[in-house]
Amino acid sequence: MRWEPLQEFVVWHSRVTRLQSADTGWAPSTDLYETPDAFCIAVELPGFKPGDFDVQATEQGVTITGQRQMAAVAGRSGQFLHVERSQGAFSRRFEFAQPIAIGDISATFENGLLAVRVPKRPRAIAAGQRVTVQSHES
């Protein structure tokens, strides 16, 4: 069996997030994946409208917060007899091992799915790293 360190990190992060969400009541289902030039976050927020959640970015990462009200879950008035869908506040924080370009982060929301694209910032050359010099002379 091949060792997949990124996959292990994703599983670990998911477990930690679930433990942390015990204080807030719930956490929406989330996928995090990486492309060569960006990190991508997909968050399931069925029944939400764009004003129901917030996306904040810092140099350390991205935080998505929001709240689902009981009335929004039901979509109508009346007394609940059985409830399985979570409600209340949530907060999801994503930190990345590579610097990110916070000014270029973009987000779309369609059909209850929030998609956040977090571009990677090119890494600086480490001190003492040899730089290859290319010449255009013949």
Image (spheres, helix red, strand yellow):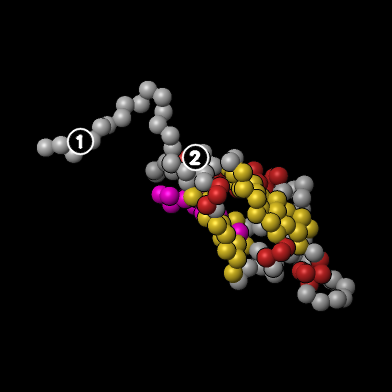
List x then y, in percent, for residue 46. Answer: 66, 67
Q: Is residue 114 left or right of residue 85?
A: left
Residue at (62, 48) in percent of width and height: 57
Residue at (47, 46) in percent of width and height: 120
Q: Nearer the viewer, residue 61 or 2?
A: 61
List x then y, in percent, for residue 126. Answer: 41, 28
* Mark 1 vs 2, N-terminal side: 2
- Against 82, is 61 above or below? above
Which label number is shown at residue 98?
2
**Three-letter code, disc 2:** Gln
Mark 1 neighbour density, 10 Å: few (under 14) some (14–19) many (20 or more): few
- Against 8, is 28 above or below? below
Mark 2 neighbour density, 10 Å: few (under 14) some (14–19) many (20 or more): some
| Badge nearest the viewer, 1 or 2 | 1
Q: Is residue 38 left or right of residue 53?
A: left
Quarter of the view holding residue 50: bottom right
Q: Nearer the viewer, residue 8 or 121?
A: 121
**Three-letter code, disc 1:** Ser
130 drawn magenta: no
> Do we see residue 31 in this rendering?
no
**Secondary element at tag 2:** loop
Q: Which residues are magenta?
A: 31-43
Q: How many marks?
A: 2
Residue at (52, 55) in percent of width and height: 117
